Amino acid sequence: MRPTIQFLYLTTLISNVVAIGQPISLAFTASTGGLRLGGNGSAPTIVIDSKDWPGVTRAGNDLANDFGLVTGTKARATTSTTGLSNVPVIIAGTVGKSPIIDNLIASKKLDASAIKGKWESFTSQLVSNPAEGISTALVLAGSDKRGTIYAIYDISEQIGVSPWYWWADVPPKKKTDIYALPTVKTQGSPSIKYRGIFLNDEQPALTGWVKANYGKYDSRFHAKVFELLLRLRANYFWPAMWDAKFHVDDAKNGPLADEMGIVMGTSHTEPMARADKEKVKPWDWKSNQSGLKKYMQDGATRGKDWETVWTLGMRGDGDTASPTLDAKSLVDVINYQQSILKTTLETTDLSKVPQMWCVYKEVGGYYQAGMKIPDDVTILWTDDNSGNIQRLPIPSEVNREGKAGIYYHFDYVGSPRNYKWINTIQLSKTWEQMHLAWQRNATEIWVVNVGDLKPLELPISHFLDMAYDMSSFTSPASTDPWLALWATREFGSSVATGTAEAMATYGKLIIRRKYELLNRTPFMLSTTNYDEAENVLGEWAALQNKAQTLHDSLDTATQVAFFEMVLHPIIAGRVVQQVYINAARNSAYAAQKRMSTNTLADDVKAAYAQDGVIQKRYHGLLNGKWNHMMDQLHFGYDNWQDPSRNSMPSVKTIGTTAPSTGLMGVSVQNSAASAPGDAAPTLAGMDPYTSENRTIDIYARGSGSTDFSISSSASYINLTPSSGTVSYPSGTSDVRALIAVDWAAAPSDLSTASITITPKSGTAVKLSLPLNNFAVPAGFRGYVESNGAVAIEMQHYTFRKSGSGGAQLEVIPNYGRTDSGLTLLPVSAATQSTATGPKIVYTFFSTTASSSGKVSVYLPPSFNVAPSTPLKYAIAIDNGTPTIVTPVPSATLGAMPTGWEDSVVNGARVVSTNIGKVDAGKHELSLWLLEPGTVVQRIVVDLGGVKSSYLGPPESGRVGL
Ligand SMILES: *[C@@H]1O[C@H](CO)[C@@H](O)[C@H](O)[C@H]1NC(C)=O
Ligand SMILES: *[C@@H]1O[C@H](CO)[C@@H](O)[C@H](O)[C@H]1NC(C)=O
Ligand SMILES: *[C@@H]1O[C@H](CO)[C@@H](O)[C@H](O)[C@H]1NC(C)=O
Ligand SMILES: *[C@@H]1O[C@H](CO)[C@@H](O)[C@H](O)[C@H]1NC(C)=O
């Protein structure tokens, strides 16, 4: 982990106060000049002028409660500073709205010049003699309503009340002493102006939970959501729309949002602040213009007094393209919408009225066709519903008055397949995409589809923290330190590092493929080559063990929060992986007539049943507080849409009659053969640098039992175990023997040893083992080819050189499917060339000469966000001419580039380049990333030995790196 400067500062300065990514203004021990606010059963008095915004008073009452949670005594909230001598006081208020604050500024006791007139800013400082009888008070002054609200919740977070204290049951930790530090904290405007979430695809989980707890999507429910959003420093909300009508379900919803400080919006398919379910029928601009106009006018009228980002444009019914709409009539729609905004809001200047037009799906086609949209409307660019942003502002668009924003997804219903069960988000990827959006000035709106909200606590926190203050996220290595801070806030510092590592690993395992897509045929992981399927299951098992150990080290109250946000996705995810991986292994073993086929069939059934147990455990938490939140089906998809019920993949069982050759069977890596019967396979070769374990599987192929022994023709080969018993149904049906070579004693260069497995009864199997005993030249640093393959992880480069313009190739830790990513930074860099651009070199040593080498570059499923400067990289071997590759085919806006579906399903786009003849010896593979936004997550050099697999061969052996 390489913490960014900003995060390092925070964690080392005062380690026990956590405000993620924010400067600290409190301490839990006395400090010179500090003001004791409370602790040990005492709490401060919070003063908020009665003339301030009601939403500020409301947040102040929350802070009073929060002091109660951490000190045992609720703070007193009052509206005046009189009679407060000898008690600790916090004064909070809004510049220009709170007479108390304005008086402090007028009397020069408070300097608010740094925030005045700014959007959502605040200052927090100790002020001497703020009022008669008060010697010092902590003053929180906001530049506007939300500036003050964020200042208040900033104190809540620092005293130990997580934004998730209710939604994820993070227990507030008791404090004996809370001090305000004598520092002036000034919080500028957020990086992104409108930052929020979209509750969507909210059935069955969230809707079932809402019905059980509130009956409908009412104002009590929304009060909880809005409080969460404000504590997370967000301000913008698209309400649920599958089964909900925000303003109609509860007339108090709209006023509540405005009072609390939430800016309302609606999704891309719901113009003019109206719900989809309120739409007139037929929903057709051509045939029912009067009906549609009334619908739109009524939306403007209803929402005119509330803070709103107006969604403009229109789409067809039910989240589809309108068959009768075209670029020209869509302009008519938008012109009409703007005309009613002018009359209804009584303004001639719409530049002060936030409006948004979302370039979602078919809408992109209209824009591509040259549709002109008014300059004061924010263009909301979208991802592909799978986290890959399709387009960002290009030079001709960056100076638009309405600017641009991003609609992003952590949950989706649609092609290739729904993903709405649990968290499937890799945070480092979110960072890469949103950092790019930020740098390309898509900063007016960020809104993310969060499905049912609940299982996505972690990616939501990460997204909104970035949106609030991207200055802490400029480093490609920002994600892991952020994760550690997040874990510290939610579960305490004792598990911070471990939790950060666990969730970084979870991100890598889940970016490989969504749970819903694991049953696509053929199964993605190889059950034959590189032990791939087994190794992946092993990674999940190790992750689960790690998370379970962390969980068990926590107190019982914190265990609940840890379960909801960390342990549950890991154990629930692991069980789904186990079902599909072991079903695939069951099928492969059946073909080999391994009796463990039957054991695996039982294992699949048990894991499938375990899924239901985990669901019940979640639903049973805290006496059923989250019942229904895990109602989503997740097994047995056969198209993009949810199946009608969960179903287990089919498994096979096999008969117990042994073949005539006897009970014992033998198989090895990279071969499906089962011997005797099939010809004895040749073992994959070994050399001193091979990174894999070389093993032999010996197993029962019928009921009964036989002893066996393993021997080698060569004394320098060790086999563990060298003998054993396989038996079925009782006893051990499968034994895996590990081959070790004493290279000091082995012949140099190429040789072949043989290994014989001899059963007590039945036919022996003789395997040959190719050996290559060589040493890389002294001083060599780099990868070593084994069996005709070099598999490279991006962080293990030999050297790199920055470009003449200062651009550099930087590692993104814990990125992609296996290890790390590499990208070109800063993303504001111009197009680079192989002559002067930054370059990175991966050295490798090969013993296999190849007449037709091939380099496969694994990229994420990214888009050409700037169509005229598509993603681009170059590779070269040694001093060869670089081959320049534009990996993503061009596509018109609204259409997906060729290969998109496979890339999204696989979490990777693999592009191969032939490199011709490669001699044995040392080589330098040079890589240039020529266009910002290009990311590479893995490279595999095929010198003729690469076997088919999903992730590619395991990382090759490394020397000196
Ligand atoms: C609060 O309680 C703790 C633990 O009992 C004690 O160490 C500390 O001095 C107390 N602080 C005050 C100000 O009473
Ligand atoms: C237009 O929509 C309204 C409201 O649904 C409906 O009553 C009316 O019949 C529609 N008009 C036409 C011409 O379809
Ligand atoms: C983004 O906006 C800033 C300020 O207007 C400008 O200086 C910068 O060049 C813009 N960036 C891009 C990539 O257009
Ligand atoms: C290789 O074998 C050793 C010894 O059994 C074991 O500790 C290690 O985990 C194995 N490595 C892999 C990648 O399976």
Image: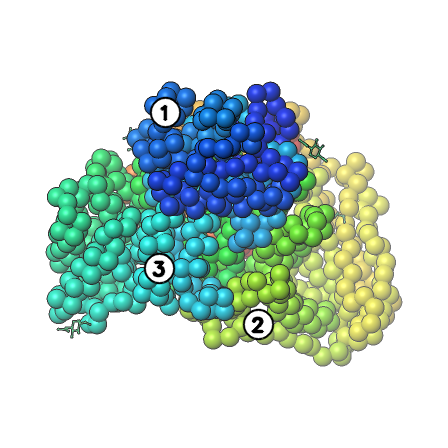
Q: Quadrant of residue 618?
A: bottom right
Q: Residue at x 57, y 62 (%)?
A: 625
According to the picture, the residue beneath numbered tag 1 turns out to be 105
Query: Colour mode?
Result: rainbow
| Residue found farthest to the front | 83
Q: CA distance from mark 2 to mark 1?
A: 69 Å
Q: Residue at x 70, y 49 (%)?
A: 555
Residue type beneath disc 1: Ile
According to the picture, the residue beneath numbered tag 3 turns out to be 252
Residue type beneath disc 2: Pro
Which quadrant of the figure contains the C terminus?
top right
Q: CA distance from mark 3 to mark 2?
A: 47 Å
Which quadrant of the figure contains the N terminus?
top right
Q: Nearer the viewer, residue 780 or 272?
A: 272
Q: Residues within 10 Å of mark 1 (few under 14, many from 20)?
A: some
Residue type beneath disc 3: Lys
Q: Nearer the viewer, residue 824 or 568?
A: 568
Question: Which numbered disc covers residue 664?
Answer: none
Question: Which numbered disc covers residue 649?
Answer: 2
Q: CA distance from mark 1 to mark 3?
A: 36 Å
Badge 2 or badge 1: first in the primary sequence: 1
Compared with residue 913, is residue 327 higher up or lower down, i.e. above or below?
below
Q: Secondary structure at mark 2?
A: loop
Q: Residues within 10 Å of mark 2 (few under 14, many from 20)?
A: some
State the image coordinates of residue 553 (x, y, percent, origin top left): 72, 47
Q: Residue at x 36, y 40 (%)?
A: 52
Q: Residue at x 31, y 33 (%)?
A: 96
* Residue 286 visible within the image: no
State the image coordinates of residue 582 (x, y, percent, origin top left): 64, 65
Badge 3 or badge 2: first in the primary sequence: 3
Q: Quadrant of residue 604?
A: bottom right
